[in-house]
Amino acid sequence: MSSPGSDWQPSPGIVNELVGLLLELQNPSSNQSQVLARLDAARGSPDYTGYLAFIFSAGEGLSLEVRQTAGLLLKNGLTASPPPPISRQAWAQLQSGLLRMLRHEARPLRHTAGTCVAAAVGVAGLPHWPELVPSLAGALAPEAPLAATEGALDTLFKLTEEHPRALEERGPGDAGAAPNDTLLPAALRLFAHPSPGVRAGAVAALNLAATGMPAFLCEAMDDYLQGLFGLAHDGEPTVRRDVCAGLVQALTLAPERLQSSLPQLIEYMLGSTQDGDEAVAIESCEFWSALCEYGDDATVLRPFLPRLLPVLLSNMVFEEHDDEVAEAEAAEQGAAAAGVGHAAERAADIKPFVGRTGGGGGEGDPGDEDSEDEEVARWNLRRCSASALDMLSTTFGDELLPIVLPTIHQRLQEHDWRAQEASILALGAISQGCTTGLAPHLQDLVGMLLPATASPRPMVRCIASWALARYSRWMFGCVPGSSTVSQATVTTVVQTLAQRCLDANPVVQKAACGSLATLVELGGDGLPPSELAAIAAALAAAVQRYGRRTLRHAYDAIATLAERVGGALGVEGAARDALLPPLFSRLLGLPDGDPELLPLLECLTAVAQACPGQVLDRYAEPSFGRCVGLVAAAQAGVASGALEEEEGAQIQVCALDFVAGLVESLGPSVESLVGNSPLLDLAQRACTPPSPPDVRQAAFALVGDLAAACAPHLRPRLRQLAGAAVEQLAPPCITGRTISACNNAAWAMGELTVRCTGEEVAPVAQGLLERYVGILLAGAGQLPRSLRENAAISLGRLALVCPGPLAPHASHFVAQWCSVLAGVRDGEEKEHSVRGLCALLAGDAGPALQAFVPLCAVLASWKAIPGAEVLAESAQLLQGLKAQLQAMSQWDAAMRSLSPAVAQKLAAVYGV
């Protein structure tokens, strides 16, 4: 290996040592953990990433596997926080080496190089790699070598995926052009390339870029769409798949551009939905839902319904050889052979736990969206067609029934269970949209579905349970004007789904738990005590019988039950006594490190938040102690290296969330538990780096709940906790990954400072003020509304107890503060904040006069009359301003600057 054209010369000894480790890593008989530990130790060496880049790009004599491993380690190093140190000379060689590798003949190495390029751009930014865009543009030229073009398209896709904004930034050195202005037109021209792989790569890259509507595509949208139409009948299925995906996306982004050609597009998608390549059929099938949801006029589809609906119904029938069916049938045989409550499981069948995000309070706390369900991995033509039928039914309603019901009725009479199953799936799909036409037949539909839940075929039992749950919204009167069924039928449905939860087949168990959760979600408070008890008993039995694979679905159903029926779990003794003992028994009985602990804790968190404190008294002390111990063990394990950071973080998040739920439920009575435990030390440590963002999110949420329940325990730690919040809310630390932790940090400080004295808060006031004001002044488009509102609330609570240190700076932020505070919903938090605003402005009217319009908007923003203290203090502030303005003969002009609605509200509420 030689170093081509660079001032940096790698040490042969270090290169040979790293190559030796990489070779050992390929040897299955070597001690892999030891090799990885030695590689990890090497990360601290100067220019570690430079050496990996050298081995990856210049190691022509090494095997592809060794070079690819070096590239993947390079990518991991570049994305580490912080990345390993590297000299400027080594960085320059890294960049040039990656550009060469993008043109390598070996596709795996090109692919790895593209991944490393995206990671390197994330470290240094595009402006610090001026050669990259011209190199990619050259490789996207029609006459460029095939390998170079494929590598450039792959890299463009990755850059678009990871750094879309960087590709749109216009620099002075580019004569005002953004990288996309060069790269996207070149990719668009490749739609006519002779290589199918290049055509597919070009379409995929343009499709991805279109999601952000870059400036080039805004101007060239018609050219892009014409390019897609030109490839509609391409001989390569991958190209057709991406064409369908692009057209569906265009319908959601710019429906007006497709309006004139919709009939032809519908005809094309109708044919593609029947394509022999399933990937093409799935992408085109997405069109029907998109047209109903985003199309300017979905009625253009009406003449096509008699041809489209039979296609969808046909697609909903299981194939003769389907993996999902094979899995269910194998589980059926396994359960029968085992002769126990569930089929035997393999460890490999149990998927890793991915929990919900840490809890938190505060105005509009968004939390992260729920993680992808495993069903997403099984998204297929059958499911996509059912989803399209569902959407069509909500758009066209009962118009579908004369077309679909004859086919459904016919297939229900067939002996082929696949036809019966597809018909039940169709009945469930149209249940939300065809309400008027189906309402008179509800009793008959339920009567037909109930026996199907006992079918000898597991997939029929699954789909019948799902369909029953879909129709349960009618049973609980959620569909206006629908006919009702007898209470006896409702009881039968609940008991039937509860019975299916105890099915011997784990595939049916999972479906039944989901169906029962749906029924609970729809029935909610309308569930009679007897039905609630039956559901709780079934789920409690499931907890004790299920294998690990399906146990998580039982936990999810219990969490839904707790969230939906709330305090009824504490009131209804039968339901409470059925559920709580087995859940808490498992919590105390499972060993540390057991993977079941995490979903169990997530379930118990929902239960704890739903149940009154007195119901949890008997479980509080042991469960509190168990979770505090779990947090302590996880922190110690991560610190010593015995636990991976991700595993330690999951344990801490789940345990902290549960403790927060317990604190919320028990209220002040939790004080003795907190005072006699190391919880506060652990929570304080979890609030600060190197704790990962999700741990900090959960820890700050717990701090806020503890402040509300037992503030005296936290007040001695105010400086440390405020310091952690100030660090979390520093501008560089507010990122997409940390936004929920930032939300909870701002909210928690508001909860704590409002319960402290002015003397206690004064030493931390300036630091908190700077962070809150920085967030408020960042602008509405730069930070989420939830964070800005939490900052506004907590700033008001800070001003309420300690206005002195804030007052000299008020003129710099009052106007923006009021603009945000006006949008906060009514409640105690807003009342505290408005009182703090009044306290801050009481001693100096100057800032109030400067921000008169937004200040009045806040005082007039109440939807309901607030508390007496807020009214009195607000009225006093307004009367003082009125007196000053009248003295300057400016009161009438000031009132004319307000909107009529605000002026009327001020007159009605405050008498000004």
Image (cartoon, grey):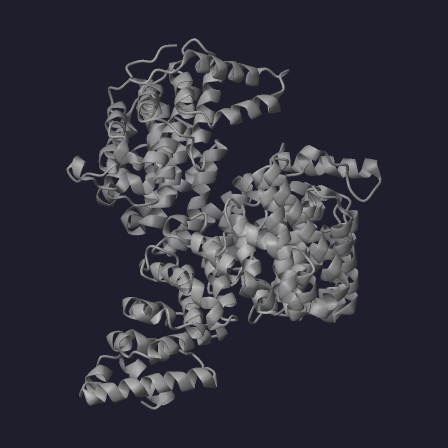
Relative placement, left or right, of 496 versus 48 is: right
Relative placement, left or right, of 825 versus 125 is: right
Snapshot quadrant of residue 321? top right
Q: Residue at x 73, y 71 (%)?
A: 571
Nearest the camera: 265 or 220? 220
Nearest the camera: 331 or 775? 775
Residue with the most extreme right position: 339
In percent of width and height, residue 684 lies at 56, 54
Residue with the most extreme left position: 175
In percent of width and height, residue 747 lies at 48, 63
Relative placement, left or right, of 486 versus 848 is: right
Snapshot quadrant of residue 117? top left
Above or below 246: residue 366: below
Tell me, yes or no, if residue 587 can be seen here: yes
Tell me, yes or no, if residue 457 can be seen here: no
Q: Residue at x 74, y 36 (%)?
A: 345
In percent of width and height, residue 905 lies at 34, 84
Quarter in which the N terminus is drawn: top left
